[in-house]
């Protein structure tokens, strides 16, 4: 996809064009074979912990949206992949070390040429988003989409940090659970069930 076709597809909301330009789920996940992954959520409570060294020791560190890092002690310093449903300012992308950007949202109004022009552009399939929406009764968070996606990969271990399902609110802003419209209770149950069924997935609280 070149810049003119990107602009046409974006402003005409041509989902099919973005999906055609994206690599497949299998192409994204196959390189994770045997790797230890750290997925960092944005719960405020994580800032009170000391998981930074453990996070940075993972083979791949994935963060979400604005990817707040209030302290290396609590959050680590690396960002290899960034799951996005919001705009990514160029300055923030540089600060994070130019991580790979994954577009997770079904909405296209916020997607940027920065995301699409990367090698191996990834746009999360609408069918996967719809399946989670049906299960949760409302739109899934970026975090739960990533957890659901990574659970289907051949990774060796997935450690979840900073996921308390809005119990401590978010480091990304002052909004409450009522302001964001997600089913946090349902997402908590989803993760609890997943960790029971899949010993590779560890929820660090």
Image (cartoon, rainbow, N blue to C red):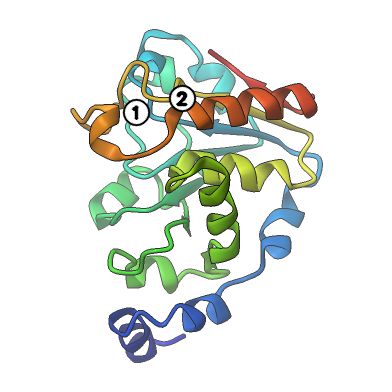
User: Which type of secondary structure does the marked residue at label 2 adopt?
Assistant: loop
Residue 182 location (% of width, % of height):
38, 38
In the figure, is residue 184 to the left or right of 130? left
User: Which type of secondary structure does the marked residue at label 1 adopt?
Assistant: loop
Q: Residue at x 55, y 27 (%)?
A: 56
Q: Residue at x 60, y 31 (%)?
A: 190
In the figure, is residue 125 to the left or right of 141? right
The reply to whether discs 1 and 2 touch (Cβ–Cβ < 8 Å) is: yes
The residue beneath circle 1 is 69
Name the mark on residue 172. Answer: none
Q: Residue at x 53, y 25 (%)?
A: 188
Q: In this view, does 151 lie above or below 178?
A: below
Residue 169 location (% of width, % of height):
30, 22
Residue 103 location (% of width, % of height):
45, 60
- Classify residue 77 by image quadrant: top left
In this view, the residue in front, 95 or 33, is 33
Q: How many marks?
A: 2
Query: Quick one: label 1 or label 2, which is nearer the N terminus?
Result: 1
Residue 144 location (% of width, % of height):
52, 39
Label 1 crowd (10 A; few <14 / some 14-19 / many >=20): many
In this view, the residue in front, 167 or 6, is 167
Q: Is residue 72 above or below residue 98?
A: above
In this view, the residue in front, 183 or 14, is 183
The residue beneath circle 2 is 76
Q: Which residue is drawn at 31% across and 42% down?
A: 66
- Disc 1/disc 2 C-alpha distance (Å): 8 Å
- Classify residue 7 by image quadrant: bottom left
């Amino acid at each position: 996809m070149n810049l003119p076709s990107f602009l046409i597809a974006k402003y005409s909301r041509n989902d099919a064009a973005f999906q055609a330009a994206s690599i497949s789920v299998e192409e994204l996940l196959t390189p994770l074979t045997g790797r230890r992954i750290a997925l960092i959520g944005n719960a405020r409570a994580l800032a009170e912990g000391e998981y930074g060294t453990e996070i940075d020791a993972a083979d791949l560190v994935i963060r979400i949206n604005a990817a707040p890092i209030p302290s290396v002690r609590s959050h680590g310093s690396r960002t290899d992949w960034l799951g996005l449903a919001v705009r990514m300012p160029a300055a923030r992308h540089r600060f994070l070390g130019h991580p790979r950007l994954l577009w997770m949202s079904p909405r296209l109004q916020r997607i940027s040429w920065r995301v699409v022009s990367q090698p191996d552009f990834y746009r999360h399939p609408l069918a996967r988003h719809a399946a989670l929406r049906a299960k949760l009764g409302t739109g899934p968070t970026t975090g739960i989409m990533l957890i659901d996606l990574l659970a289907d990969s051949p990774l060796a271990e997935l450690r979840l940090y900073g996921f308390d399902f809005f119990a401590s609110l978010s480091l990304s802003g002052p909004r409450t659970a009522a302001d964001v419209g997600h089913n946090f209770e349902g997402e908590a149950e989803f993760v609890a069930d997943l960790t029971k069924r899949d010993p590779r997935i560890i929820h660090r609280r």
